[in-house]
Amino acid sequence: MDAKAVKEREPFHWQTSIAYKNKDKIVVRGYDNNDLTGNVTFTEMAYLVWRGDLPPANHTRMLDALLVSMAEHAFSPSSAACRFVASGGVPLHVGVAGGMLAIGSLHGTADRPAQLFTDAAERMQRESLTMQEAAYKVAGEARAAGRRLPGYHHAQHIIDPRTARMLGLSDEYRISGTYVAMARAIEAATEEFWGRRIYLNGPGAMGAVCLDMGFDVELIKGVFLLSRTVSLIAHTYEEMHREKGWRASTNSPIVQPLDLSLQKPEFYDGPRDRPLPKERGGAR
Amino acid sequence: MDAKAVKEREPFHWQTSIAYKNKDKIVVRGYDNNDLTGNVTFTEMAYLVWRGDLPPANHTRMLDALLVSMAEHAFSPSSAACRFVASGGVPLHVGVAGGMLAIGSLHGTADRPAQLFTDAAERMQRESLTMQEAAYKVAGEARAAGRRLPGYHHAQHIIDPRTARMLGLSDEYRISGTYVAMARAIEAATEEFWGRRIYLNGPGAMGAVCLDMGFDVELIKGVFLLSRTVSLIAHTYEEMHREKGWRASTNSPIVQPLDLSLQKPEFYDGPRDRPLPKERGGAR
Amino acid sequence: MDAKAVKEREPFHWQTSIAYKNKDKIVVRGYDNNDLTGNVTFTEMAYLVWRGDLPPANHTRMLDALLVSMAEHAFSPSSAACRFVASGGVPLHVGVAGGMLAIGSLHGTADRPAQLFTDAAERMQRESLTMQEAAYKVAGEARAAGRRLPGYHHAQHIIDPRTARMLGLSDEYRISGTYVAMARAIEAATEEFWGRRIYLNGPGAMGAVCLDMGFDVELIKGVFLLSRTVSLIAHTYEEMHREKGWRASTNSPIVQPLDLSLQKPEFYDGPRDRPLPKERGGAR
Amino acid sequence: MDAKAVKEREPFHWQTSIAYKNKDKIVVRGYDNNDLTGNVTFTEMAYLVWRGDLPPANHTRMLDALLVSMAEHAFSPSSAACRFVASGGVPLHVGVAGGMLAIGSLHGTADRPAQLFTDAAERMQRESLTMQEAAYKVAGEARAAGRRLPGYHHAQHIIDPRTARMLGLSDEYRISGTYVAMARAIEAATEEFWGRRIYLNGPGAMGAVCLDMGFDVELIKGVFLLSRTVSLIAHTYEEMHREKGWRASTNSPIVQPLDLSLQKPEFYDGPRDRPLPKERGGAR
């Protein structure tokens, strides 16, 4: 590298539009952090930090509803993961982060249906389709290609109870627009191509409502992450205080998940028992 | 393991007091999740999930204030960590979890001062001390042993601007009790032993206020984690959208953190350059 | 869910082909773990655990060379990430895991070039092309579409010094086959389409060599992960023992990365300072 | 902060004794990385990166044996955790890191028994005790205080089969010294205080042997981490290729861990079902 070129560059520093601080104050998106404290709710603060401005009243109510609806769901990949991490003997934040790692492309996927609805709406424009026509194309092509529609179907609930509640509030708060309509249109179209209705699930509803609130697709995943962090804290905390490390104790009245009876030789289907070859040092 | 004993145990299942679900509904601490959605704020929901009951009004306002105050702090170990994780090319949730891992015993440590205040209050009782006497003992013994007081001093702010705001609201909302008083008494006592005032910092204030709201020590760390997750989402998202992967590009106007000029041979102080010994295959 | 159907299913247990254990022994891919201990090297053990059989001698030597070559690379996204995680005050394993999270789609990406070479080789077969023809199509199409070739170019080294060493040993150990040849052919083809040679980088070489050893594409990422874990342990350990928490101290002779001078208001480009609107409680 | 003081400090850069790189080469602990590649084994490389020098031959053999012995253990907190993380739909490295997070103070704890043996040996010196006397004090005081001895007892194996193999090789390779002797002496002493022998487990043996090889206590945890990473890669990979996301499918012949039948209302013991109070918006 050319030493001269380096000198001409600004020395390293971070660059951000989120916040700055100095010895005396912390400024977030232009507001003094102390002005915000006591005057805005945590939900409004999240909206401000993420999007740069405080939300209008109906966005606050809707975001609260979404964050509440997705905050707790008993056992899912993330709550199970945080418990196994916790069972190894770690501080609270490590269990919570371990659970969050599980919120991948198959769990809490509000961003993936949001991308589907965004693409469908763009296509409606580009190809001058009615919404129903666009929905039919999206559903029909997915079915023909054997692809699942992200944001539809829930393996445990089939009809996810959270969906109707979130969409109802979205209508009531006058949030629902193009994307909620598209989400509904695609659900309706599934009947034609699957022979039964494939229902919009909770993350799917969250994705559509967030788009109608103007959230960027990728940031919608963030909304889910914040919401579910509530649950991960509770599950990690409960695991730490209620269960013994390792979860393998034979003294527990419930067979523990790492009990040897759940990992018997019969449940192993790799190579059969075999001696190490002699030339490798076997047959001792 | 005794096969008979195993058979007498209940087959494996999870056991929890947080929530349950079935095909048709999700129940959180006894409430139908859909009843909560639209009727309680996210802050109230967090309180319910963590503590089992909905908060009284002053707890809601106080918890909102604490969560807002700690939500964003520009660059700290966690926001820096989430950016480096993101620079390796990962989904949003992985950057956020990576940042959260940094919120350890030296960062966002509201639980550690909470433990200090709890211990001090118990000692006050046990040894029949006045609060001032207990505070003097705690501060004096720490100073004598060369120990730092968790929750006091902030390397960047010296006088953390968040502290006065949080404690002021705690007084206003009639939350402040034994623990806030103890936090203040220990701060006052530092003048005696350090020769200057060591100020209560933000996490220290959060710890005292949460104790006076009845939070368990370890759960107080969870309050910080939820709050700061807002920031980690924003920083990870900004990194993904504003910066190039690796942060090593020589084309950037700012010297990037992984630029070779920041990791020159002169900054290495291990063994000098040496040949691999001949018997190891060196001198090729 | 149909209660009858559930009853007919086997109760929950794990199912695996990797290993089993009982009270008295641990069996890995058919071998008693104690037979392996002392008789095979760690590199041979990794190969066995991952692929089900012990490696032939030239695979052992080659895998050792690859694991050595990629084990340490000074500062990269992962070693920087592990240090910031460690600076928050966490146990060693948490720093190491935090660093590993950064080894995403832009870092240590031996799997992505491996996919490129696999696709190119399949296309050569399918379209009855010579290797050179296939390589020209792959390079030319990427260039035309403005896509980068995974496994080629290194922002810091330009000509990655590890590549020639790894490929030379692969030839010497008689590993090099179709995939190493394809990697070389694509490098040669870049001259035609970029007007200069775009060099195969270290992870690219690792990907090609691993394919010629019969590794599955996705598992090749695992080879990199194991290798670089050595580095993450060293960097996390050094950070914990050599640096102070937070890395913000103004007493250090080197400006610390979280020093306020690296995060000045001038480096913030979000909304300018503004008062909280009166109706939100501002103007206190 | 004093602007003048900042100017007098060196601008930010990393400082390390592990490695450096420039455009043309990578130097690790003084050796050119390309000299090491092909000439040292991965085990020797790990030793060099961690400790600064290449190992003597008996250390290489011993370290290989330890890394092999601990590489795979079927289902434990970490392999279970990596599988649940993977079930959420994440890249390989995220599952592996998620599993690693579980290797906390209760799992793979070679460092904790190493601390116990270090303390016992120091005490032997300081108090001029015989080894047996020191071991009796350590065991007796732990028993009296109701403390468990780290590195002793294994919930699944009782007599951990790995221990005798590792210690036997340590004797054979002439590694065994003070710490292995102390580990054995403490095991012998448990009979006196527990009324039965509490056996040294695998991580305990690893800790003692590593101390006799001159490893620093905290770095011994790193030895375990590297070893078990082999397993986490295999389990994450198997989960990704063999199982369906979420692990909740009712179509599987085995009841999946997140099946609703494993999280029935009967397994919930929090507050009973209750309506939301009217003043909160309940009774809809």
Image (cartoon, coloured by chain):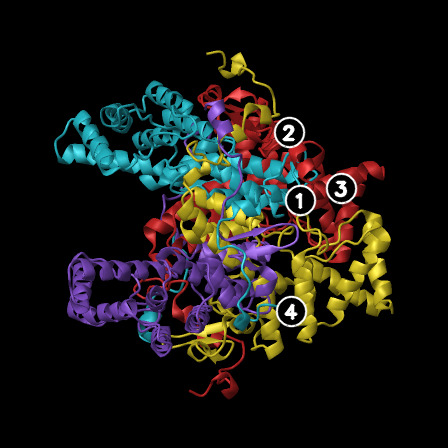
Chain colours: A purple, B yellow, C cyan, D red
Q: Measure how far apart labels 3 and 4 are at the Cα level.
A: 39 Å
Chain under disc 1: D
The residue pinned by badge 4 equals B215
Q: Amino acid at mark 2?
A: Ile
The extreme left residue here reads C128
Q: Quadrant of the C terminus of chain C?
A: bottom right
Is residue A198 in view?
no
**Residue located 33% across and 57% down the image:** D244
| Residue toward you, A275 or B169 | B169
Task: Name the mark on residue D113.
Answer: 1
Q: Earlier in the sequence, mark 3 or mark 2?
A: 3
Pair 2/4: label in front: 4
| Vertical side of D60 occupied by B119: above or below | below
**Residue located 49% across and 70% down the image:** B10
Disc 4 crowd rating (10 Å Cα; few below 14, some 14-19, many 20+) is some
Chain under disc 2: D
Q: Measure how far apart labels 1 and 4 are at the Cα level.
A: 34 Å
Q: Position of residue D136 (x, y in %)?
A: 78, 46
The residue pinned by badge 3 equals D120
